[in-house]
Image (tube, rainbow, N blue to C red):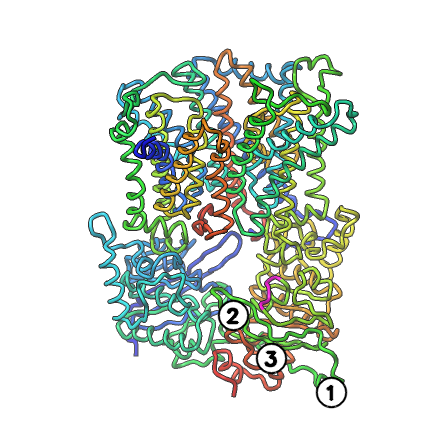
Amino acid sequence: MNDPKAPMILMRRIEKSFGPVRANRNASLEVCAGEIHALVGENGAGKSTLMRILAGLYKPDAGIVEVNGQNVAGWSTADAIAANVGMVHQHFMLVPTLTVTENVVLGREPKRGLAIDMARALLEVQELAQQFGLDIDARSCVRDLSVGVSQRVEILKTLFRGARILILDEPTAVLSPPEIQELWKVLRRLRDGGGTIILITHKLDEVMEVSDQITVMRHGETTSRMKTSETTPAEIARAMVGRDVVLESIAPTPPAGELGTAAPRAPLLEVQNLVVAGPNRSRAVDGVTFSIHPGEILGIAGVEGNGQTELIEALAGLRSVSSGTIILGSRDVTLTSVRERSAAGLAHIPEDRQRRGLVLDYSVGDNLILGDQHEFTRGAQLDRQRIASNANTKIQHFDVRPADSMLPVRALSGGNQQKVVIAREMSGGFSVLLASQPTRGVDVGAIEFIHAQLREARTQDKAVLLVSAELSEILALSDRVAVMYGGRIVSIVPRADASKEFLGPLMTGASAA
Amino acid sequence: MSSATEVASPESVSPVRAGRWRTRVEEAILPPLIALLIALVAGDILILSFGQSPGSVYRMLLEGTWGNAYGFGQVIFKATTLIFTGLAVSLGLRAGLFNIGAEGQLAAGGFAAALAGLLLPGATPTLIAVPLAVLAAALAGGAVGWVPGVLKARFGAHEVIVTIMLNFIVLALLNYVVAAHLHVSETLHTPEMRAGAVPRFSSFLEAFHGSAANITFLFALVLAGIVAWFLFRTRGGYDLRATGLQPDAAEYGGIRVGGVWIRTLALSGALAGLGGINYVLGYKHYYEEGFGAGAGFLGIAVALVGRNHPVGVVLAALFFATLSQGGLAIHALVPKQMVEVLQGLVILAVAAAVPEVRRVLRMRPGIAAA
Amino acid sequence: MRFVDFLAQVIRIAIPYLFAAAGGVMAEKAGVVSLALEGFMLSGAFAAVLGSFYSGSPWIGLLCGIVAGLLFGLVHAVASIRYRADQIVVGIAINLLVIGITRFFLRLAFDSSSNSPRVAGFSEPAQGNIFLASLSNPLVWAGLLSVPLLTWVMYRTPFGLRIRAVGEHPEAAETLGIRVPRVRYGAVALSGMLAAMGGVYLALDQHQFTDGMTAGRGFIALAAIIFGRWDPARAGIACLLFAAAETLQIQLQGTQAIPSQFVQMIPYVLTIVALAGVVKRSVPPAALGRSAD
């Protein structure tokens, strides 16, 4: 269909490092005018970095960036805007205290004399919104908008600057299914009007549904480029992950069948009607009930931002509960502190290890006692000898590299940082483990190691609550799978009944069959 | 480039770690050195603008401070208060809290010590009177520090603003109490205390004659040691530093962050309050309005230049005390106000150099992975 | 005392606060902590006296004061924006630096450690009626106008919109091609000039410079900003309120009804109350104190 004309956007041999981290290496991209182009890859594959280079936010270390045939490598955001390139970021770039109109016109305000011509600004924004079918009240304050509307404001911002090339970074991560459908409509309308759209995503159903062309990235490199109508999800997945073997190893390994036959034992974790407040009087967790038995992994699947983070933090004691109860073993811990829960047998691998799970400037040894620091004392003093021997044991057992307990954790790779967290959380006498995105941003070797650890905990009769954005991970490890949507658990099924086909619609809000 | 993932046996010190240590030391020491250099150049300009030769002025400055026992005694006297306020500010900063209220806490501590000495019967043995006066100073300063801690933990009120505002409130309050009820007529100070004075160095070392240096200095050194021990060797210090570095991780590690804030600001206030005993118990034996003479604010400079380490604080306190005593020594040639300019410049230069040095050092290849 | 005289006295006391608060709002709205208002004011006061002394014209004095404020504003901006120094420390350092510099040059220029000789000002208070004297002082008008003008700039002009965006969400502004450091430089430099004008007024009103003559007024202005929840108009009203309390205290001085120290505390106590959110929480700009990455 596309005649072999020169591409509108051409990026070639792009290199970009942040300190020692190489985000892009030999990355390339070709996008033709008038198409919706999906840029896909796993988390950390370098998609956002590549697009930020295109939008003028980062300067590439090396490589060619051409837009409409002109080399623009290293241009500024202002240059990019002037060349009609606009980007909608994953985290909204909106000023919450300003109105929609103010956010849209910021940086190119219509003027009357020295002042902003507010009346004209409002009119222009309203007209533009109407023209592209974006339902927005231009007068309202951005702080009061829902995420769906906020995203429309973001799109409107780029259109106001005359964007013909629109980059969207994971636009559906925070949207509900109807909002997603609305977004697709807007994007198709833009494309049909001659616009070019680059969609960053790691969700294959979206890619299949809305894109015309696909570029796949992995480990900072571009691995393949294909036409959507001529490929299959399996083929894209293979290009994303790199090797069939990995797919094989994460592939469903249905748990041993003894679970059903064993005498029912008392659950180790029971959650009843849990409600956790969200921003603006909403409920981030809205009446969640479940229990986990010894030797069981309960996986929570769902689109991120549906209350998983708040649920885990409430269970860990880091967030207060509005109502409901949490029972750990036989003890009601709903109102207890982090430390009391830890003493009662709760371990927690947090979602964001760099912010929550580790004190980055503390040594590996000091991080290996975080949460248990009161047990490593002699009087008021820290017992340095025991801290060191504790560190050396765990470093060896969990193969943390480099094996130096005095090194600040900041100096370790992501995978080794996560090993420190896991070494600390999983070697104590815990009975319940909360594991939130345990393999996020770690390399394949570490993923396999971490999965083995979780399975090991299961064989030792621990109860594990696993939250992951990767459905394949949930399916590979869980005995039962729960789906969270809009702060509720919409379904809990045994692993045998859980398939991607069954879970997919639930995750996007379709009611359970 | 990044050799951080090399395998090393647990016993050996990895090359990565050795590099880290060097970087850390350089990060700590370079900014003050840069600042000193800038101050020297600026000092030259000021001295030349007054038509004097920088060499002879600097020589005079050194001779008038470290060159004779009296000058040295005065340096020690001035450094003593600065050690207390510098420790106060740096303890707060280690917990991520900026205590700008040392000035008010210092005054409150001095007043409480004087009041205790005034209320005690004249016959109270020194061994009882001094600890009581010291305790009073710590409690008063601690109480003033506790307020912003509670307001931050309970209401999220930023401690910087609260401590600034509290300075004015505390000083006005003390001003009122002294002016309305406690002053010796025709003066702005309280009556002399009946008990609780501590000896000056000159009472057993004749060379110090005339200088106000007193044994509070030794107490300050001991306290610096205690603070270092607390910060780096105890669980309380572990919790405090974790809170300052990453409050979210501290909370995850079972540390009650709000509690650490309250305790730290109270402790910080107590340290600043103790600074009051140097002047009150060791020198004048009464509380006088404005006795702190900016030592609270200078404590911020001391903490900054001393890089929040108790050893650094002691050295920085001696440095700033040398400057301020040196100002008096050179007054015949150049106005003593010159050193105030230099003090301001040093603070500014250190503040600007700290992030810059860190950035430059972190860009040096082969240090570590992110 | 007649009401107009009372009013004139309130305005006279409020003018330095109004200038400094206007400057402070501008810098803080752009995300730069404003602890150096005191220093800016003092530098303006001293430079104004120098200028007026050597030229005999208060207008030259005003110009010198503004230039001094600009210079220290730029020092603040370079340290905290270019070098990403801690903004709180920079503010304190500038305050100490200006105290030192004014004292040093007071010695150098006038060979005094306390005050300058008398210089020409805009008004002659000796003429009796302070109300009329105030009316003839252009700085009084400028100070009163600074608040509505600032409101207009902040809420009606592109520069103001950009300041507000940069102080709340610098990354968002950056993605739209706005040069965040440049906006902040502008705001902090203007803030220095505005606050310095407060010092100019103070010194020319008294026809001389005295050591440390700003006496904490920069911090009262800061209190007014926080009490006014970072809004120019509300901060202006707070300035007038604090000035009224001070006037009242001066009036009551003979009567011993309330000790003056308690009146002095009012602004500070109110600020703490506002921060603790007893009535309505005073919330600073989101990016306040955060240096750009």
Three-letter amino acid code at the position of disc 3: Val
Three-letter amino acid code at the position of disc 2: Arg
In the image, which residues are magenta? A318-322
In the rendered structure, find residue A481 and report the number of the disc placed on it. Answer: 3
Q: Chain of mark 1?
A: A
Disc 2, SS: strand
Q: Earlier in the sequence, mark 2 or mark 1?
A: 1
Q: Quadrant of residue B98?
A: top right
Q: Residue at x 37, y 32 (%)?
A: C13
Three-letter amino acid code at the position of disc 1: Thr
Can marks 2 and 1 be said to lie on one chain? yes
Tell me the CA gap for discs 2 and 3: 22 Å
Residue B45 horizontal/vertical position (percent): 44, 20
Tell me the CA gap for discs 3 and 1: 19 Å
Question: Is there any visible trace of residue B117 in the rendered image?
Answer: yes
The front one of A43 and A305 is A305
In the rendered image, which residue does mark 2 sit on?
Answer: A283
